[in-house]
Image: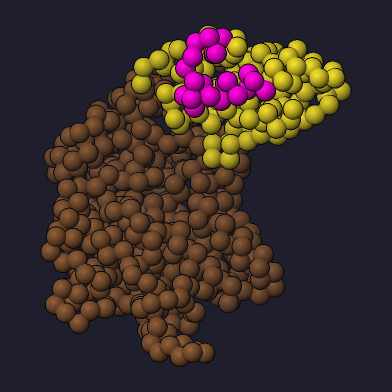
Chain colours: A yellow, B brown
Amino acid sequence: MENLDEIYNELIMEHSMNSYNKHKLENADKCEHGHNPSCGDEIEIEIKMNNNIIEDIAFTGSGCAISQSSTSIMADVLRGKTVEEAKIIIKTFIDMIKRETTDEKELEKLEEAIAFKNVANMPARVKCALLAWKTLDKMI
Amino acid sequence: MNVDKIKKDFPIFEKIDIAYLDSGATSQRPQCVIDAIDNFYKTKNANPHRGAYELSIEATDVYENTRKKIAKFINAEKSEQIIFTKNASEALNLIAYSYGLENLGEDDSVIISIMEHHSNLVPWQFVTKKTGSKLEYMYINDEYELSEEEIKAKITDNTKIVGITHVSNVLGTINNVKEIIKYAHKKGAIVVVDASQSIPHMKVDVQDLDADFLVFSGHKMLGPLGIGVLYGKKRLLNDMNPFLMGGDMIEYVYEDKTTFAPLPNKFEAGTQNVEGVVGLGAAIDYIESIGYDTIAKIEEEVVGYAKQELAKLDFVETYYTPNEDNHCGVISFNIKGVHPHDLATILDSQGIAVRAGDHCAQPLIRFLKLPATCRASFYIYNNKEDVDRLVEALKKAYSMFEKFIKK
C-alpha cells in the first residue's frame, strides 16, 4: 500500500489525537449516535442550529484515527454552512470515498476533508471515514 | 522437521509475500488438501447416500470414511458420534437448540466463561432467555486465567450446561477443561467444549476429557472453509431432536408424521458439503504426518520468540498469561495510545496480516477495558522471520504515531 504517510499525515493525526472539536456542546439542538459494530468505532455528534445554518458541531467518542479525525475535520468544514450546502458537501465526501467522483473541481468543496481522498484505496477503512458524515446526514 | 520445508507445502506463500499471522481466524491450506478436493471432483463426485450406482457409493465411502477418520482422530468411541456441520458456530447452535431449549428450566443456569467467542455465547443468551433460565459467567483473573475458585463458585447444583472454550481466541489461555468437566459432572451439568482454537495445535481426546459435546471448525486446522464437526455423547445425541429437517435425515415420512434416521444422519439434513469433508480428511492426514509433538515444538519456538521480541518494545502492551504451559497460539497486543485498526492498517502496508478488533469476543474486550486489540496468531508455517517483520513494522508504526500520542 502506497500513500500510507498521506493518510496518517499531520492534519489527520492532530485531529484524531488532540481535537478541539471533541467535547460536549452546551445547548445542542440535536444529538446522534453513530457506530461501526464490526470495529467498535463510536461517536456522538451534537449540533447547534441557527435557523437553517449549522452554527456549531462537536463530538465525543472513541475509535481509530481515521474515524475520529474524519469526525473532527467534518465539524470544521460544515460549521457555519447551511443545511443545503452541508448536504452537498456530505454527498461529495461520500462520493470521493466510494470513488464515484474524482473531479478535482468538485472535490474543492471539501476543503480540508480532501485529506481523506486516499481512504478510497483502503477498502477496510472506508467505513471508518464515512461514519461521521453518514451520521450527520441523518441529523440535518 | 523444519518450518521452511513445511512452508513449501502451502502454495499461497509462493505467490504472496506475506507474514501471515492470522491463522486464528483461518489457516492456510497445504497443497494436499487442495489436491484432495480437486481429485474428489475429478474422480468421485456424486451425491452420497443417494444413488444405487458405483460412483455414488464411492462418494458415500469417502464421506463415511472421513467420519471414521475424525472419530479416531479425537478418540470418539463410534463414528456416528461425529456430525458434520458447516462450522463450529452451527454445531454450537445445534446443541443450544436441540439440547438447550429442551433441557433447561426456570431454576437452571448455563455457565460460560467470559472469554467465549460469540458463537459459544449468543446461542446461550438466546436459549436461557427463551427458557427462563439464567446465564452466568466465569471471569478471568489477573493472569487471564480461570481460577479454580471461580469455577467452583459459578458451577453449582443448578447448573445444567457449561460452555467453555478449550483455548481463548483472544488471549491464548488454555483452559483446564478436563478439570472443569470433572467438576461440572459432579454437579450434574453437561459440558460443551469449543475446541476450534485448540485442535489445530494440540491433541484433543474426547474420552480423556470426558466432554459431553465438543465442536471445531475445519478451516482453522488446514481444512477447507465451510466444514465443521460436532462430537456428542451417544446417549445425548440419541435423545435430542433434529436441528434441521429435510432430506436424508428421515426414516419414514407420512403426510402427518415422520420418523427420523439414526445417528449421525438425523443431524445431517440435505446434501452435505462432501468436498469440505474430503478436504478436512486430507488436513487431518497432513497434521498426523507432521505430528502434534512437532507442531508444538515449532509453535513454542516461534511464539516464544515473538513474546521475547515484543517484550523488548516498551511501547507495546501484550495480553497473555505468564504461565507458559497455559498459553497457546495467539498473542494480543496494542501500542499504547494507537487504535488497533490504525495499527493493523500500517502492519498491512508492511505485508503483515494480523486481525484487529474485538475478535468476536466483545464481552471479553469490555471486561479487559480495552477498545480492541491487534492479534498475531501463529501456526506451523510461521517462522522467526515473520516475527522480525512484525517487530520492524511495529517500530515503524510507533515512529509514525509517537509525536501525536497523548502522554
Q: Which is more toward the observer, A109 or B120? A: A109
Q: Position of residue B2 (x, y in %)?
A: 15, 40
Task: Report the quarter where the C terminus of chain B lies.
Answer: top right
Q: Is residue B186 magenta?
A: no
Q: Which is more toward the observer, B260 or B382? A: B260
Q: Position of residue A22 (x, y in %)?
A: 70, 19
Q: Which is more toward the observer, B364 or B182? A: B364
Instruction: Identify the residue at horizontal 18%, vertical 77% (top origin).
Output: B57
Residue A93 sits in quarter: top right
B275 relative to B340 in the view: left or right: left
Q: Position of residue B383 (x, y in %)?
A: 24, 34
Q: Position of residue B215 (x, y in %)?
A: 40, 63
Instruction: Identify the residue at horizontal 52%, vertical 62% (top origin).
Output: B163
Q: Is residue B338 visible?
A: no
A14 relative to B335 in the view: left or right: right
Task: Report the quarter where the N terminus of chain B lies.
Answer: top left
The magenta region covers: A87-108
Instruction: Identify the residue at horizontal 58%, vertical 20% (top origin).
Output: A92
Q: Which secondary structure dominates the residues rendered in magenta? A: helix
Q: Is residue A101 magenta?
A: yes
Residue A42 sits in quarter: top right
B403 relative to B133 in the view: left or right: left
Residue B12 sits in quarter: top left
Instruction: Identify the residue at horizontal 15%, vertical 73% (top origin).
Output: B55
The answer to whether residue B133 is above or below residue A102 is below
Q: Is residue B266 visible?
A: yes
The answer to whether residue A31 is above or below residue B105 is above
The answer to whether residue B299 is above or below residue A80 is below
